[in-house]
Structure formats: structure tokens, C-alpha cells
Image (cartoon, rainbow, N blue to C red):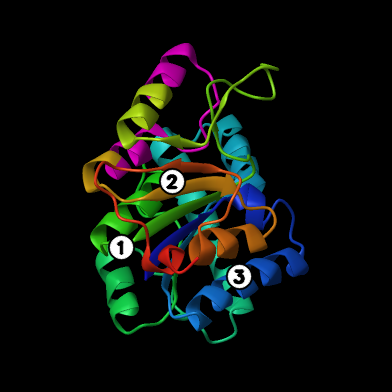
Amino acid sequence: MKVVVSIGGSVLVPDLEAGRVSGHAAAVEELADAGCTVGAVVGGGPTAREYVGTARELGANEIALDELGIATTRLNAKLLVAALEGRAAPKVPEDYESAGEVLRREEVVVMGGVAPGQTTDAVSAALAEYVDADLLVYATSVPGVYSDDPNEVADAEKFHEMTPGELVDLIAGDEMRAATSAPVDLLAAKLIERSGTRTVVLDGTDPSAITDAVLRGEHGGTDVVPAGSEEPSYWAER
């Protein structure tokens, strides 16, 4: 089973606490030990936002701001690589071809950002498409996809299952309303729709939620299920 796990920066490194990074590394190792081919993509989190905020005050343009964000995601990725203690390729790839080569060697690969104008949400979806992953997991700081921001709307509906097209429509509507209910961005959703990659969006602050979702299909998040999608083989054994 080939899986891409997108770990939000706010999940992995809301602060530089080693135990949290080690916990997520252990989850990646458990997947690899179970026979999964694993690609991980790490976001920038609050550190990236601090750098970008300061640089914006200093007058940096948007491309420069994006490049600062990308650099931070790659630093965060290096933390996860360090925690994996030799289980992952030591170099953080900067493009999909290099990442794919690592996976073909059956090593764990850890990526950060790739290019300006593209979030790590989109990088994760693009990597999953590039390597033809069986499953894409977004480990976020929220427990799934909602109709509205659950922090702002008390009766926001949580979606337990939806199609990629429904995810695209929801996020496109959010962006028009400047809302923030969706835990992945529009480009990522469109890539998921194009590739037909089965996707799970869940609260990944507890690393065991990632392994439960991948190995057993058990989670409290949102399944994004393309038409005709087959359940990963591991789930069929439940």
C-alpha cells in the first residue's frame, strides 16, 4: 500500500517540542513496518507565519514571502527526518521526481514545499498523484471537513464522507465568502478530484489517528471518496 501523509506544521511543530516530532515519526515508522510505502509532506506552521509576517512588514514581495515559507517547511521536514533516525532519505527532495525516486527505493521520503504559489496541501496531493498513491491522509488540527468554520458556527455540519467534486465546491464557496472551514486548499482539492486519489482528512494531533486511518480505515474524520474508488487492501481485512 502506497500512502502520502500530509502533516500540518501546526500539528507537527506548533512549538519546537521534540517529543511531538518523535511521536509522528513513530507513526510513520509503524506504517513502514506494516509494509506501506510512505511519503510525508510537512507544513510550515506558526514558524512560517512568523517569518512571513515579519518579512511582509519589511516590504518583501509575495514571491519572496512564499520562498520564506517553503524554506521553513523544509526545515520542519528535516526535523521529521532526524526523528526517523535513518528510516527516511536524509535529503529533503525539492521536486516530485526526486521524491518518487526515493519511494521507488522503498525508503520513506519527507518533503516540504516545492514552488511559490503552492501550499503543502497541494504538494501532498500532487505527490500522491505523481506516485499513484492508494491513500492520501491530511493530518490537520481539525477533525475533518465542515460546512462552516466550527469555531465560528456552532451548528456547522461535519461531513463523514464526500466526493472530491463536493470538496471542490465547498472550498470554492468558502474562498468566495473568505471563510476558513476547509482544512485543505482549493488547488489541493482540484488535484484530488483530477487524480481520483482516495483521501482522508482528520485530526492528526494524536499520531495514532494516522496509523488507525491508514492500517484499519478507522478514524473520526472525513473520507473523500472518488467514484469507483476501491478500499485499500488493509481495510478489507477488518
Dot 3 crowding, Cα within 10 Å, few <14, some 14–19, many 20+: some
Q: Eyeballing the image, is 54 above or below 233? A: above
Q: At 70% across and 17% down in the image, what residue appears?
A: 154
Residue underneath mark 1: 95
Element assignment for label 2: helix
Estimate the x, y position of residue 104 in percent, counting from the top left.
28, 79
**First to last magenta residue range:** 172-192
Q: Decide which of tag 3 and tag 1 comes sooner along the chain.
A: 3
The residue that appears at 56% across and 40% down in the rendered structure is: 52
The residue that disc 2 covers is 121
Q: Assign the magenta stretch its main secondary structure.
A: helix
Identify the element where label 3 is drawn: helix
Which residue was labeled with disc 3? 27
Q: Position of residue 83 (x, y in %)?
A: 63, 76
Which residue type carries mark 1?
A: Asp
Task: Indicate left or right for 40 with 75 as reference.
Answer: left
Which of disc 3 and disc 2 is earlier in sequence?
Answer: 3
Please tell me whether mark 1 or mark 2 is closer to you in this view. Answer: 2
Amino acid marked by disc 2: Asp
Please give the name of the residue rendered at 53% of the width and 22% of the height, measured from the top-left corner: 147
**Picture coordinates of residue 85, whole percent (x, y):** 60, 85
Disc 3, disc 1: CB below 8 Å? no
Locate residue 185: give its quadrant.
Answer: top left
* Element under disc 1: loop
Near-viewer residue (45 or 68): 45
Q: CA distance from mark 1 to mark 2?
A: 15 Å
Q: Nearer the viewer, mark 3 or mark 1?
A: 3
Image position of 212 with respect to 188: above or below: below
Label 2 packing within 10 angstroms: few (<14), some (14-19), many (20+): many
| Amino acid at pointer 3 | Ala
